[in-house]
Image (cartoon, rainbow, N blue to C red):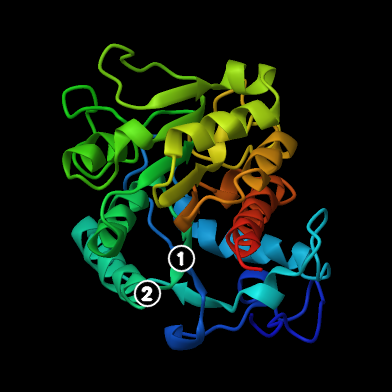
């Protein structure tokens, strides 16, 4: 059990420097979960700007600081988890290899200590080095992937090269980072090769027609007992709920449905997670950033729900 580490002030506008007002620290020894920003968007194929995602999500998260115990949870997450904000990872501007090496180094060090991570992107390419860091300490993981796109595009299909936010889940199975037989994608509504696709898919139309409980049941059945990496591309949400992203696609799920599904993942061993693709320059009134901040908090509650 952790001491409540929310700041004494619950102001939504003063000293807004970290996610949820958490302590800015790199002392991972005392932490259970480490929040990190990865301000990278060189893998973007549409509208750029997700390098400012971590900053935008942190600012919007101030709106969540006043509620010590989030509804409808019956406990405060900070009573069960000691969470710190590690700040943003810094890497050489314009060098994707520098970002990859930095992520593997810092995230790997956290997981080497048996801690968990919640990372804020940045574009979705950052998930590939995150999975490489996870693999060093957890072996292959089950991927629970929320997105409008499968991000399984091959080098032949994807003209943007190796550092692209649409190729991660083509490379990850080939590298043995994830087990596609226990992985699932939710919210997909763009083209992919159904004959060669390795993952189970609950497309957006089905995710909207099924009950949230049905979607949760399908996820849990697919994952089984494996450790889980949860990645949430904010464009899984319909643009009405997340306009501030690089590749918006209409027909997505609502924030309400997303939260219900994530909330239902209690019991899964989520060893790491990320929320990516927030582009504040295309946002309005922090709609997208607030959705991402809230999804991140919901993931923390799911992690904490396994601790009694």
Q: Which one is in front, 89 or 75?
A: 75
**Image point (25%, 34%), residue name:** 170
Q: Residues within 10 Å of mark 2 (few under 14, many from 20)?
A: many
First-in-chain label (1 vs 2): 2
Q: Position of residue 261 (x, y in %)?
A: 65, 38
Above or below: residue 22 compared with residue 148: below
Above or below: residue 136 compared with residue 24: above
Q: Outermost residue, top direction?
A: 195
Above or below: residue 225 compared with residue 62: above
Q: Position of residue 281 (x, y in %)?
A: 58, 49
Q: Which mark is residue 209?
A: none
Q: In this orientation, does residue 24 appear?
A: yes
Q: Which mark is residue 117?
A: 1
Quadrant (top left/top right/bottom left/bottom right) for the N terminus: bottom right
Q: Residues within 10 Å of mark 1 (few under 14, many from 20)?
A: many
| Element assignment for label 1 | strand
**Image point (71%, 46%), residue name:** 287
Given contact means CB atoms under 8 Å apart, are the residues at marks 1 and 2 in contact?
yes
| Element assignment for label 2 | helix
Tell me where residue 6 sits by quadrant.
bottom right
Q: Position of residue 308 (x, y in %)?
A: 66, 68
Residue labelled with disc 2: 110
Q: Which one is in front, 162 or 232?
A: 232
Q: Position of residue 65 (x, y in %)?
A: 77, 70
Tell me where residue 78 sits by quadrant.
bottom right
Tell me where residue 113 sits by quadrant.
bottom left
């Amino acid at each position: 059990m952790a001491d409540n580490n929310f700041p004494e002030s619950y102001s939504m506008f003063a000293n807004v420097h970290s996610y949820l007002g958490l302590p800015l620290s790199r002392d991972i020894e005392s932490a259970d979960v480490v929040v990190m920003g990865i301000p990278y968007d060189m893998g973007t194929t549409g509208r750029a700007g997700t390098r400012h995602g971590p900053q935008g999500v942190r600012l919007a998260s101030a709106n969540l600081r006043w509620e010590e115990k989030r509804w409808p949870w019956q406990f405060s997450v900070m009573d069960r988890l000691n969470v710190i904000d590690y700040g943003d990872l810094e890497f050489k501007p314009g060098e994707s290899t520098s970002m990859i090496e930095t992520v593997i180094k810092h995230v790997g060090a956290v997981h080497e200590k048996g801690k968990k991570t919640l990372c804020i992107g940045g574009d979705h390419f950052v998930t590939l080095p995150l999975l490489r860091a996870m693999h060093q300490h957890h072996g292959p993981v089950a991927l629970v992937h929320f997105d409008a796109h499968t991000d399984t595009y091959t080098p032949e299909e994807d003209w943007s090269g190796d550092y692209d936010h649409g190729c991660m889940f083509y490379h990850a199975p080939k590298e043995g980072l994830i087990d596609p037989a226990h992985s699932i994608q939710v919210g997909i509504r763009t083209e992919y090769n159904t004959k060669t696709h390795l993952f189970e898919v609950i497309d957006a139309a089905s995710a909207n027609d099924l009950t949230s409980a049905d979607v949760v049941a399908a996820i849990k059945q697919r994952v089984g007992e494996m450790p889980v990496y949860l990645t949430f591309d904010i464009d899984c949400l319909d643009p009405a709920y997340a306009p501030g992203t690089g590749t918006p696609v209409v027909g997505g799920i609502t924030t309400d449905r997303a939260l219900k599904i994530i909330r239902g993942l209690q019991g899964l061993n989520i060893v790491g997670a990320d929320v990516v693709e927030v582009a504040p320059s295309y946002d309005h009134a922090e709609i997208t950033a607030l959705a991402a901040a809230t999804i991140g908090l919901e993931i923390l509650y799911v992690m904490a729900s396994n601790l009694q």
